[in-house]
Image (cartoon, helix red, strand yellow):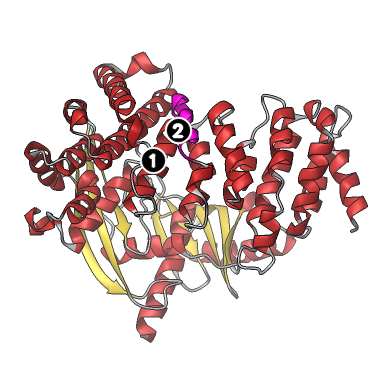
Amino acid sequence: MNFVSIIDRIESLLGESADRLTAGETLQELASLDAENLRLLLETLAENRVLVSESDPAILGGLLLLAQQWGTSDQAAPRHEQLIHQISPDAVCQILAALPQETRNRHRLLYLLAHSRTPAALRALRDQLRYHPPRRWDEVALVLSPLMMGDDWSKADFFPDVLEGIQHRSVAAPLLDLCNYLTREKRVPIHPAAERREFLARLLGEVVGHLGRFEENPRNFGDSIEEVQRVLDEAVAMTVTLCDALGMIGWDGATGKLFQALQLGHRRVQTEAAGALSRLGVEEGREHLIALAAEPAARLRVLAYADELGIADEIDESYRTDQARAESQMAVWLAQPHQMGVPPTSAEVIDSRLQYWPSFPQPIDCYLVRFEYDLGTIRYTNIGIVGPLVHAISADLTDFPVDDIYALFAGWHVDHPEIFVIDSGQFNAAQRRLSTSLTDSLSRLGYEAIEPKLLGVCLTESALVAKGSFQQNSYLVLWDGIETIQTLATDQPRALAATDLWHLYIGRKMLRTFNRDH
């Protein structure tokens, strides 16, 4: 496809007359082209600014996503650096100014500026963060991430003017995280925000007060769980990075505000405040930091601070073992917003073993961690895995044999193009015939009222997972013509699903084969 044809396709997506029904197909066609068309895409959008301002925001969002994908693909290719340095910061800024307000993915253009890291790109990014930043802090964090990847950029083209962006809620935490990282890695002689230390201390006091009110009554901060969680995440991220910044700046005047943060109930905030106070030589901070090692959700960060501050030998040895670190990894994973959202009440390794695992060339340490949430009248307990991955599922595994728990996670973790499942509603003619054959043989085994759920394919082998009754009990059963795996079918919310049974089946095969062969 020549460049004229490419321009025609891009322009067909712009303006009020663009057809949304065909836009997806056109975007897919463009995505299949060589990444060297990035400059052509940006120039075309910049030259058609009036059309851009009148375009469908959803279509524009697709084009901006395409721009980032082109800009970050084939980074190992010899031409990539030249390609990314050809990005025109002026063109990017012109596009940003023309985009309709509701356009998503505008931050991906800022990401390209940071990825380019040329002086002109850095100055353009600096001004965008000062005057027209993204609305969400996680978008700003993505934008700034390329500046942590290498030290091949001029700090003078970015700092100190970009720090004016701290006034924006979305910019403050990610930008200070970058400052903290550069200071910790000794890529700058002094903390870039050192001259703003009094402002940072006042800001910490405000955010800590906000978090304190949140802990008293979270309902004051949103009408939904999602809104409350978003407010909490922003406040915690801001508090954590402010504590870290003030500790590394080394200003004693921040001690009072750090002590206020230390009084909050959030363990991550306590850890950062204690770490900052320890860095400032405050004994109470050091003692509190050491005590926090007993908390699984805080342990990994505590150990990192202890190593950094040279006090690791003051942490109880029982909290520095590999098992203790695994418990902490599980607790941190569970506390993430898209998991449970809060750390567990307790976490304990119940089994560990060195074994071969799918996609790992050497044996790897695997840990099963039992965790519990004590919610007063309700207790929630389950078992997750740490090692080759950190993961837990909704099904209750507490009474499962240990070998099968490992197998289920191994089956969930395996990633191979010839290992997949097909839902019964998506069977083609050949798959329906195979399902019928396996269903018939299940009937001969005594199962009745068989309802296929899915068909699993593993290389040349297949297995059916179905619901059926056997001797007056209802089961979920997997059958490959030789082996059956079954579990009672119930309406309980934590019962095994059809995909869980498939993962158990595949995981057994994988772990058996890998560890027998070695």
Which of 220 and 237 lies nearest the eye of the viewer? 237
Please name the residue that numbered disc 1 is placed on.
192
- The answer to whether residue 380 of the structure is visible from this angle is no
Magenta stretch contains residue 372? no
Given the image, on which type of amino acid does mark 1 rest? Pro
**Lateral position of residue 408 relative to residue 99, left or right:** left
Magenta-colored segment: predominant secondary structure: helix
Which secondary structure, mark 2? helix
Please provide percent x and percent y for residue 493.
39, 39
According to the image, label 2 marks what residue? 163
Determine contact: label 1, label 2, CB under 8 Å: yes
Q: Residues within 10 Å of mark 1 (few under 14, many from 20)?
A: many
The residue carrying pointer 2 sits among few (fewer than 14), some (14 to 19) or many (20 or more) residues within 10 Å by Cα, namely many
Q: CA distance from mark 1 to mark 2?
A: 8 Å
Describe residue 428's horizontal placement relative to residue 312 as left or right: right
Q: Assign the C terminus to one quadrant of the image.
A: bottom left
Q: Is residue 374 visible?
A: yes
Observer-nearest of 472 and 407: 407
